[in-house]
Amino acid sequence: MATLTELLHEGRALLEEHSPSADLDARVLLAHVLGRSETWLRTWPEHRPGREEAGRYRALLRHRARGCPVAYLTGEREFFGHSFRVSEAVLIPRPETELLVEAVLERLPGENAARVADLGTGSGAIAVSLALARPQWTVLATDESDEALELARVNARALGAGNVSLSRTHWCADLPGDLDAVVSNPPYVAEGDPHLKEGDVRFEPRAALTAGPEGLDALRAIVEQAPAHLVPGGLLALEHGYDQGEAVRALMHEAGLAAIETLRDLAGHERVTAGCR
Ligand code: GLN
């Protein structure tokens, strides 16, 4: 039987040419199979897992070597300090999307009750994070995909966000008319974008990633439709591509929104644009 040190070494060697984060991937996958933390792995380097556990670990390594995202292999991803279940039916939550959550929390006064909608919720990462940070809000999470809604429901329940409700709908169709905020991380990648052929995105649902030849179709639809569902002064906050800030500001301007502002992510890219009705 191999020790943890040997298994991690084996994992790193196997993943080296397939993943930019071979060392981390091996540790996350081994910790997942053993049901332990990465700290535990470091504490017990001489521990020898059983044959069955080593076999499951090696199977995950082979999937990872073929490109499958680590989050789909473990079935979870951390977002805004919470652990979300994920599956191939939804986009894997990204760190830059935390900026969108922060932007909404900063702009809506915390103590008031508010009605907020998260369009295209996927795993529910945005909706559930907002709902947990603001228990007095009611958060409506929408998606076109039944599988995504089921996963969002599982996440809301597991994380104790009783103030999230779910609805199957296309962007703003069937939205109530008195929302304090509409927030979305819609698909915004251009259909021919070469980066769709690289890394994790190859395994993610296309419908959650691409939106027309310039990637602007979903953003345009939301900016055109959302203001009618906002109370006066209501907030629209959207994530978009690094090169779409100008286009989204122009769309919000045309839609009559005010106080339009774009925020940059940690990489320095324009990533979130917000405006008020
Ligand atoms: N940020 C993601 C990517 O570029 C895309 C997310 C989205 O389309 N909403 O991989």
Image (spheres, rainbow, N blue to C red):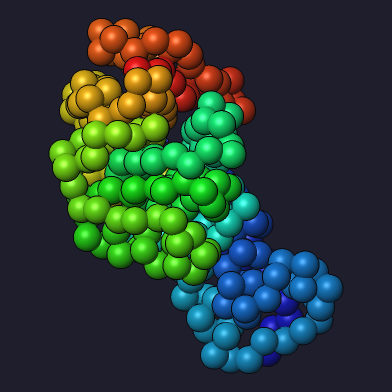
Image location of residue 20, percent across then percent down: 57, 46
Q: Residue at x 62, y 52 (%)?
A: 81
Q: Quadrant of residue 190?
A: top left
Q: Residue at x 77, y 73 (%)?
A: 40
Give left or right: position of 12 versus 182: right
Give left or right: position of 256 versus 2: left
Image location of residue 131, percent across then percent down: 49, 50
For residue 129, above or below residue 198: below
Q: Nearer the viewer, residue 218 or 189?
A: 218
Image location of residue 229, percent across then percent down: 25, 30
For residue 107, above or below residue 82: above
Q: Is residue 98 visible?
A: yes
For residue 60, above or below residue 276: below
Q: Is residue 66 visible?
A: no
Q: Residue at x 22, y 60 (%)?
A: 146
Image location of residue 117, percent across then percent down: 35, 41
Give left or right: position of 135 versus 147: right
